[in-house]
Amino acid sequence: MANYDFAVVGGGLVGSAIAYGLCGEGHRVVVMDEGDVAYRASRGNFGLVWIQSKGLGMPNYSDWSQSSSRLWLELAPELKALTGIDVQHQRSGGVHICHTEREWLQRRETMDRLSRETEGRFHFEMLDHRALASLVPAIGDDVFGASWTPMDGHANPLYLLRALHAGIHQRGGEYRRGGPVRRIARDGGGFRLERDGESVHCQRVVLAAGLGNRGLAEQVGLEAPLLPNRGEVMITERVAPLLDIPTTYLRQTGEGSLQVGDSHEDVGMNDGTRTEVLADIAQRALRAFPRLRDVRIVRSWGALRVMTPDGCPIYQASVTHPGAYLACCHSGVTLAAAHAKRLAPWIGGGECPEEIVPLTAERFHVRVSETA
């Protein structure tokens, strides 16, 4: 039975970024991935590195996301130098499109609130149509304006996942595909992880298995109240440069194709697609960018977001099972740099980042006062 300093359960963007960071700290790390039978949120997401609206009502989450945006400027070139893989990261700023004045005013109120809650650490600008058109020339006339923030950007999630896996290997870690981990148990001073046909021993374990964390967390005295939320995405044929900066629901990839999405559906564990949802996505994109009318859609898919009750991440160390850690979030691309460069060092024995201190599952426990 193999023995490691850390076993990271889950080989998606969250688990891989943490494992990459742990390997960089000199730890012996194995990533235990479920394989292609998993729901694969990391391979179906939109690819935004997005700060707008993150942390409304939870300002430390905004600060955490902003720190990751800054660290992306280190992570992307580091991965390219180590692995040769360009993850196509750009921090060009991003816009949230508002079609009507009412939407624009509501958006401004939301952005103002987030700025106040972060004591001005979150920066934004509200653009009218003329200002937006100077930034995004392809924008349609039927758009009132947008919000813009300088820290937004995007990356290629598939290249990112590939680069993290390659980086783990380059740094001496192991990646093992072989079905879901079914049992985690104390074994001496460490843990024994079991899945069909394989057992692994480790001193410490990190649960980063997305929706799979729900069943695993309770085995180490933790709680993962997660629900799936489906997003559907369409990809167009490659087109001439149309969009220099990403929007909430449309971005142009490094290869020239356009990615269109941002639907939200509560459909359980169904990661399929519905024609009416895809049609609504297409109509919204056409309203904002009329030039897309003759562009062909070449493929589409659905993927399941890993959602907590309030949309903010969960990071927690187990009290009852010292050495077990939990990481749950739906922003695997945005937070990849923070996971690799700030979360992993904490898990490895360093100081806990101040921003994540409130982000435990305890925040969902509601105390009901007794009445006479």
Image (spheres, rainbow, N blue to C red):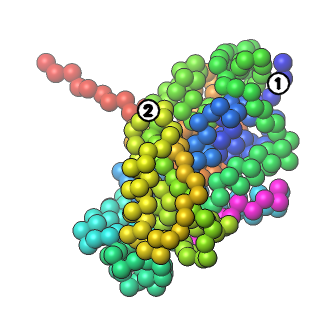
Left or right: 193, with 297 as reference point: right
| Viewer-proximal residue among 175 and 302 | 302
Q: Kindly report which numbered mark, 2 or 1, lies closer to the viewer in this rendering.
A: 2
Residue 90 lies in the magenta-colored region: yes
Give, as a three-letter code, the residue at label 1.
Asn
| Viewer-proximal residue among 333 and 260 | 260
Q: Position of residue 167 (x, y in %)?
A: 80, 49
Residue 3, labelled with which disc?
A: 1
Give, as a three-letter code, the residue at label 2.
Gly
Residue 173, labelled with which disc?
A: none
| Viewer-proximal residue among 70 and 139 | 139
Q: Position of residue 236 (x, y in %)?
A: 57, 62
Residue at (54, 60) in percent of width and height: 297
Q: Position of residue 279 (x, y in %)?
A: 41, 55
Residue at (24, 68) in percent of width and height: 102
Mark with earlier residue (2, 1): 1
Residue 320 lies in the magenta-colored region: no
The residue beneath circle 2 is: 268
- How far apart are labels 2 and 1 at the CA level? 37 Å
What are the residue bounds of the magenta stretch? 83-93
Quadrant, the C terminus:
top left
Helix, strand or loop at mark 1: strand
Left or right: 22, with 324 as reference point: right
Q: Does any portion of residue 207 appear in the rendered image?
A: yes
Residue at (57, 29) in percent of width and height: 212
Quadrant, the N terminus:
top right
Q: Position of residue 3 (x, y in %)?
A: 82, 24
In the displayed structure, would residue 106 be above or below residue 363? below
Q: Does any portion of residue 9 appear in the rendered image?
A: no
Residues packed near mark 1 inside 10 Å, few (<14), some (14 to 19) or many (20 plus) = some
Helix, strand or loop at mark 2: loop
In the displayed structure, would residue 49 be above or below residue 313? below
